[in-house]
């Protein structure tokens, strides 16, 4: 039998892993760091599983050198991390905390010394609590504070950093944080307030882009990490694909229209009615500043077919549809095909990165040898095959970051749900690469799905 063709990725394809500050650093109050809304939220009874907090997480604050040595041994050359705003500005604004800046300088130094290229997210959900006390994402003043933070960050870290990501998953810290969802600050506000938090987040994205253009090094690149909802056509027929594409626009119009088209879509404004956000002159120009790429965090999706008159009809999932242990993570590798295709075909995105993809399982707290995490390996492998198929039909995907390098603080799920390809024993802080790490190493090295 002839060998099936190897799923080789384009030359220069970027392979990496991802984490975020709150989820790995620990040292929540060290060297002058101020509390973030996640420190506070976790301390509130009933908000996080077993009341677990981001302390000590993976104690990466003290262990980053050995973590980078491990990354190097695992063949990891690109690493997406985030900077903690409250480390640089314990009060959210004002005078920067030099010790916080110094920490990231040491960290970036060690990272690059290990041959690892940083991809830095400016904001991954850890709003300084001091700003929350002044209204947080609800008030426009927070966007000024973010602008100053972004300026400081890009100035301080540009000697090491060429790849910037402004914000991670706007919906998670706006709607899920303020609409009765499960994310900090955990409030329930009116639809108008929620729309306003989105608007302020979008303005901050614009500030991030501006800061990179003003202070970034030559060739610096910047984009957003979005987590679009991904409708997957039930069949790959023209009708179902058109329905899925229409659903993709309807689902993601709130973030992608302002960023790619410099406007709030009439359909969005009509639906929002009197709850639409307050917009100042110049805001949309700032939000739509040209970016260099769009990051997509892709985990799952839903199925759609063409209903009456071609209208998208969402198909309910039967009980028992396969999922990871994270209950929201229905296993739909096709999201890696349709996410990039939709982004390209509807908004004309010309450079895409998968900034996150992976799977969360309840694995043992202790382990002595490589966990045979074949469930994670299998899902990621299927996702990569679908991503390859997307690239083959023209989706401009330039790279892929696996979530996550190591098990970490999974927000409201605490330490219970593990996404790492490296196991972490949170009692001893011992790291043990899982089977998926050995496999991913071979993928990165050969630039193909093995
Ligand atoms: C990403 O979020 C995060 O960027 C990362 O920090 C996190 O650790 C990782 O993924 C794994 O969770 O409405 O009940 O169906 C993914 C966030 C989780 C957001 C599921 C939407 C829907 C919950 N997504 N959530 S539900």
Image (tube, helix red, strand yellow):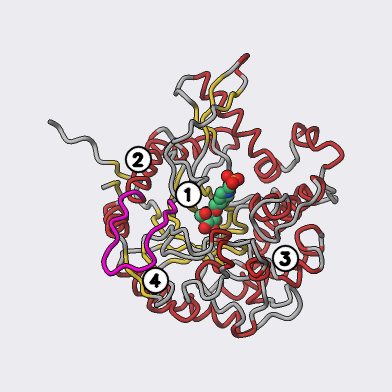
Q: Is residue 68 above or below residue 141?
A: below
Q: Few, some or many C-alpha atoms within 10 Å of disc 1 (few <14, some 14-19, many ≥20)?
A: many
Location of residue 177 (image quadrant): bottom right
- Residue wearing tag 3: 147
Label 3 CB less than 8 angstroms from ligand 1: no
Give the numbered dot on residue 385. Answer: 2
CA gap between label 3 and label 1 equals: 26 Å
Where's residue 330, x and y in %? 47, 41
Q: Does residue 293 appear in the picture of this structure?
A: no
Of residues 366 and 16, which is closer to you in this image? 366
Mark 1 element type: strand
Q: Is residue 132 magenta?
A: no
How many angstroms separate mark 1 from mark 4 (CA)? 28 Å
Q: Earlier in the sequence, mark 4 or mark 3?
A: 3
| Viewer-nearest of discs 4 and 2 | 4
Q: Earlier in the sequence, mark 3 or mark 1?
A: 3
- In this orientation, which residue lies closer to the viewer: 445 or 246? 246
| Marked residue nearer the N-terminal end (1 or 2) | 1
Q: CA distance from mark 4 to mark 3?
A: 38 Å
Q: Which residue is mark 1?
A: 354
The secondary element bearing badge 3 is classed as helix
The earlier-in-sequence mark between 3 and 2 is: 3
> What whole-number distance in Å separates the C-alpha atoms at marks 3 and 2?
39 Å
| Secondary structure mostly taken by the magenta-highlighted segment of the chain | loop
């Amino acid at each position: 039998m002839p060998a099936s063709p190897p799923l080789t990725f384009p030359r220069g394809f970027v392979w990496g892993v991802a984490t975020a500050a709150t989820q790995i650093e620990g040292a929540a109050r060290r060297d002058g760091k101020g509390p973030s809304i996640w420190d506070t939220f976790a301390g509130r009874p009933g908000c996080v599983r077993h009341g677990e907090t981001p302390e000590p997480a993976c104690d990466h604050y003290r262990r980053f050198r050995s973590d980078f040595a491990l990354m190097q041994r695992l063949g990891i050359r690109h690493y997406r991390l985030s900077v903690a705003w409250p480390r640089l500005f314990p009060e959210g604004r004002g005078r920067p905390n030099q010790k916080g800046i110094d920490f990231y300088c040491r960290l970036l130094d060690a990272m690059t010394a290990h041959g690892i290229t940083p991809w830095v997210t400016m904001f991954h959900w850890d709003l300084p609590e001091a700003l929350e006390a002044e209204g947080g994402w609800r008030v426009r003043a927070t966007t000024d504070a973010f602008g100053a933070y972004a300026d400081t960050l890009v100035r301080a870290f540009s000697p090491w950093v060429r790849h910037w990501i402004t914000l991670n998953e706007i919906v998670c810290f706006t709607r899920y944080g303020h609409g009765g969802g499960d994310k900090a600050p955990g409030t329930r506000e009116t639809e108008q307030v929620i729309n306003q938090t989105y608007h302020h987040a979008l303005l901050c994205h614009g500030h991030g882009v501006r800061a990179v253009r003003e202070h970034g090094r030559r060739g610096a690149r910047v984009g957003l990490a979005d987590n679009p909802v991904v409708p997957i056509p039930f069949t790959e027929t023209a009708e179902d694909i058109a329905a899925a594409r229409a659903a993709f626009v309807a689902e993601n119009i709130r973030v992608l229209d302002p960023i790619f088209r410099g406007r709030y879509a009439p359909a969005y404004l009509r639906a929002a009615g009197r709850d639409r956000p307050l917009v100042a002159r110049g805001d949309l120009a700032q939000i739509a500043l040209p970016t260099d790429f769009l990051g997509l965090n892709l985990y799952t999706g839903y199925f759609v077919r063409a209903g009456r008159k071609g209208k998208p009809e969402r198909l309910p999932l039967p009980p028992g549809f396969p999922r990871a242990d994270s209950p929201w993570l229905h296993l739909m590798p096709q999201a890696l095909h349709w996410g990039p295709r939709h982004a390209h075909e509807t908004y004309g995105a010309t450079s895409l990165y998968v900034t996150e993809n992976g799977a969360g399982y309840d694995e043992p707290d202790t382990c002595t040898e490589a966990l045979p995490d074949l469930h994670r390996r299998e899902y990621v492998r299927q996702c990569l095959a679908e991503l390859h198929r997307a690239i083959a039909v023209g989706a401009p995907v330039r790279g892929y970051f696996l979530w996550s390098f190591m098990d970490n603080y999974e927000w409201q799920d605490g330490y219970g749900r593990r996404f790492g390809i490296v196991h972490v024993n949170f009692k001893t802080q011992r790291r043990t690469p899982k089977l998926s790490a050995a496999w991913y190493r071979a993928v990165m090295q050969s630039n193909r799905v093995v």
